[in-house]
Amino acid sequence: MGAIIGVPGKVRLEVNLVPVPQSVAIARVFVRHQLISLRYADRIEDASQIVSELVTNAVRATASASPGALGRIRLFLGPHHGRPLLEVWDSSPEPPVPREPDFRSESGRGLNIVRSLAIDFGWYETEGGKTVWALLR
Ligand SMILES: Nc1ncnc2c1ncn2[C@@H]1O[C@H](COP(=O)(O)OP(=O)(O)OP(=O)(O)O)[C@@H](O)[C@H]1O
Ligand SMILES: [Mg+2]
């Protein structure tokens, strides 16, 4: 876990995860812990689903972007204008592409779940990859 000092007096708590499927469960624990300490415990259920989808996507994207190389995924959850903001950074330059909801399809559900549970979500390019974010209720 890394604490990055941003705004003076404020600590930005992040976790670095290895891009393997087991990291999804660790991400849920981090999110749960952060929401409890920020007094947003009633958001745990939604946030757990959202972070599971975003980290699963990041694991998959990182594996295909650098097969064989052990990359990193970075996870952040903190307050943003009175709401919890979740951010997942990965090193793949490819953007997430939400698909049209299709109940017959077995994939392409993840971002639709995120879209339905979060107030808003999106992504931005960062040096060496991109960050996918979700603003919670
Ligand atoms: N972090 C990411 N990096 C690169 N591409 C991504 C990322 N997240 C999503 N995508 C792209 O967006 C598409 C849609 O993502 P989504 O999570 O909705 O569906 P899925 O991951 O393909 O299937 P499911 O989540 O239902 O298992 C993915 O197939 C992938 O091409
Ligand atoms: Mg997915």
Image (spheres, helix red, strand yellow):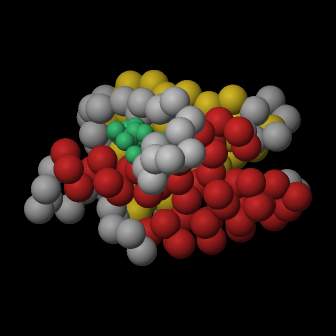
Image location of residue 68, percent across then percent down: 11, 62
Could you tell me which quadrant the C terminus lies in? top right
- Position in image of residue 108 (x %, y %): 46, 43
Q: Residue furthest left?
A: 68
Report the residue that reaches farthest toward the top.
124
Residue 5 lies, with reference to residue 20, above or below; the image says above
Name the residue at 42% across, 74% down: 22
Camera-side residue: 48 or 7?
Answer: 48
Which of the 4 image quarters holds residue 40? bottom right
Q: Residue 25 location, x and y as percent?
A: 53, 72
Query: Above or below — where is 114 with respect to 124?
Result: below
User: What residue is drawn where x is 85% and y is 61%?
Assistant: 41
Question: Where in the figure is residue 9, as x and y percent of width and height?
Answer: 70, 42
Work out whether residue 118 or residue 124 is closer to the camera in this orientation and state it: 118
In the picture, measured across the screen, residue 88 lies left or right of residue 50, that is left
* Residue sitting at x 69%, y 29%: 120
In this rendered view, identify the residue nearer to me: 88 or 110.
Answer: 110
